[in-house]
Amino acid sequence: MQQQSLQATNAWRILFLLFLANLFNFFDRTIPAIIIEPIRMEWDLSDLQLGLIGTAFTIVYAIAGIPLGRMADTGGARRKIMGWGLAVWSGLTAVNGLAWNFWSFLLIRMGVGIGEASYAPAANSLIGDLFPAHKRARAMGIFMLGLPIGLLLAFFTIGAMVKAFDSWRAPFFIAAVPGVILALFMFFIK
């Protein structure tokens, strides 16, 4: 009985970690949408180029999710898939702040898309293992709260970061920090 209670407590702790990473997944991917005007002005971008930033990210994310999901299904260490994916997308988020032109920004965003694509399939699979069927819907609901809360947090903080640091690049550097920290925690999931 005590062993089951410990396992349940551990499952909820892991779920909280997964929720936080999901929150930053959506926070990070929202940054360009919020600061698109300063980027447009700095590099004198066309509407087509602005559209390509989001479109390229989405296409790469969708395509990369298929083999990464297969890796999570076929017994790949999901904690490693999530940890490395989180480290990649957080690291590349910081590198986005160093982009020197449109093409560098676009290619880096595509890399962020690959890193983020690793997360959802592995996290969903892990939640399926951690929670029995009668608790799984609640666990998935908590996990998916990361999406609206991440977006809300981004919309309320990104502008303030840009203003405080007088740079559209600052949010990329700031957003990378919690992601890298969470990536380290992912590797210790049992």
Image (tube, helix red, strand yellow):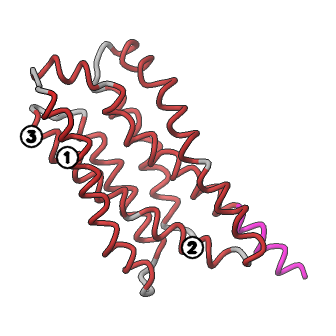
Mark sitting earlier along the chain (1/2):
1
Amino acid, disc 2: Leu
Q: Is residue 120 left or right of residue 113?
A: right
Locate the N terminus and report the quarter of the image it occupies: bottom right
Q: Are marks 1 and 2 in contact (CB under 8 Å)?
A: no
Rendered location of residue 64, percent (x, y): 28, 66
In this picture, which residue range is highlighted in magenta?
A: 1-12
* Residue at mark 1 to residue at mark 3: CA–CA distance: 8 Å
Rendered location of residue 110, percent (x, y): 22, 51
Disc 2 marks which residue? 126
Few, some or many C-alpha atoms within 10 Å of disc 1 (few <14, some 14-19, many ≥20)?
many
Disc 1 marks which residue? 108
Q: Residue at x 13, y 34 (%)?
A: 49
* Residue at mark 1 to residue at mark 2: CA–CA distance: 28 Å
Task: State how many labels appear.
Answer: 3
Few, some or many C-alpha atoms within 10 Å of disc 3 (few <14, some 14-19, many ≥20)?
few
Amino acid, disc 1: Ile
SS for dot 2: helix
Disc 3 marks which residue? 103
- Magenta region's main secondary structure? helix
SS for dot 3: helix
Q: Nearer the viewer, residue 132 or 62?
A: 62
SS for dot 1: helix
Q: Residue at x 24, y 38 (%)?
A: 96
Extreme residue in the right direction: 1
Mark sitting earlier along the chain (2/3):
3
Residue 4 shown in magenta: yes
Rendered location of residue 185, percent (x, y): 52, 59
Q: Residue at x 28, y 18 (%)?
A: 167
Q: Is residue 29 above or below residue 75?
A: above
Q: Is residue 178 above or below residue 58?
A: above
Q: Is residue 74 left or right of residue 134?
A: left
